Image (cartoon, rainbow, N blue to C red):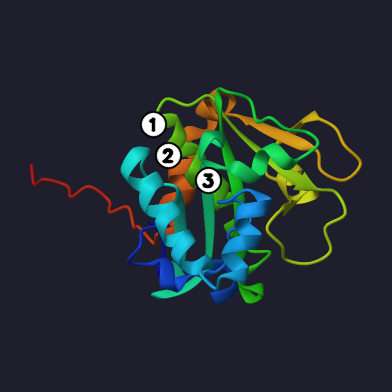
Amino acid sequence: MGRQLVPLTLDNLPDLPKRCRSCVFWELDPVSGEAAVKAGRPELEKEAWISAVLLEWGSCGRVVYVDDVPVGFVMYAPPAYVPRSTAFPTSPVSPDAVQLLTAWLTPGYQGQGLGRVMVQTVAKDLIQRGFKAIEAFGDAHWTEPACVLPADHLLAVGFKTVRPHPRFPRLRLELRATISWKEDVELALDRLLGAVQKEPALRPL
């Protein structure tokens, strides 16, 4: 299978599931988000948010393709761009961290390690951009796909709880701790992208 993790842009935004394209849970505060839904413009607000973050901060997501078919995505941004984060009982996100907003995989592609590679890809991007950590709000009572990621999944891919809560703990992944496995990340990415390492050609003596 040919697999790729491609930066999220306005061009490939249509490759996200429809319900995610029109969801502004993280991008707007609760009052503005409700107003956008009532006005029938959540997709426009989503596009405006992604455009602003891309222009001011840079890449804020990845779309996962398998054989050119979109099968998942992940989104992240500094907490200053995420109004909803202040509404959580375990806020605020630490000032030295980027917030992991949400991620999603087609059910048929779950359980294959893609979730871990998505997080590793985000980690690699943020290490190169000089950030210290990723933080996320987890849902300890998660039962079905939603905007808030399951806390158990975050713990399984390396996050640690920094502020406990019975429902919405805040978790953190230290990027400096990932430097030791940076080569492993690159190897995983090579495998994910289907890269083949060619044996060096032997020169005739």
Instruction: Give SS at disc 2.
Output: helix
Local packing at callout 1 (Cα closer than 10 Å; few below 14, some 14-19, many 20+) is few
Q: Return the x and y of residue 142 as percentages of the image width and height.
A: 82, 58
Query: Which amino acid lies under the numbered mark 3 shown in the image of this protein?
Result: Tyr
Please tell me which residue is depicted at 39% across the width and 30% down the height of the picture.
129
What amino acid is found at the position of numbered circle 1 in the picture?
Answer: Gln
Q: Is residue 44 visible?
A: yes
Give the quarter of the image for residue 38: bottom right
Q: How many numbered discs, if any? A: 3
Decide if residue 198 is on the left or right side of residue 18: left
Give above or below for 88 relative to 172.
below
The residue that label 3 is drawn on is 76
**Which of the two labelled residues, at mark 3 and mark 2, occupies the earlier sequence position?**
3
Q: Position of residue 194 (x, y in %)?
A: 39, 62
| Label disc, if present, on residue 128 of the rendered structure | 1
Q: CA distance from mark 1 to mark 2?
A: 5 Å
The vertical placement of 160 against 58, above or below, is above
Residue type, mark 2 in image: Asp
Q: Earlier in the sequence, mark 1 or mark 3?
A: 3
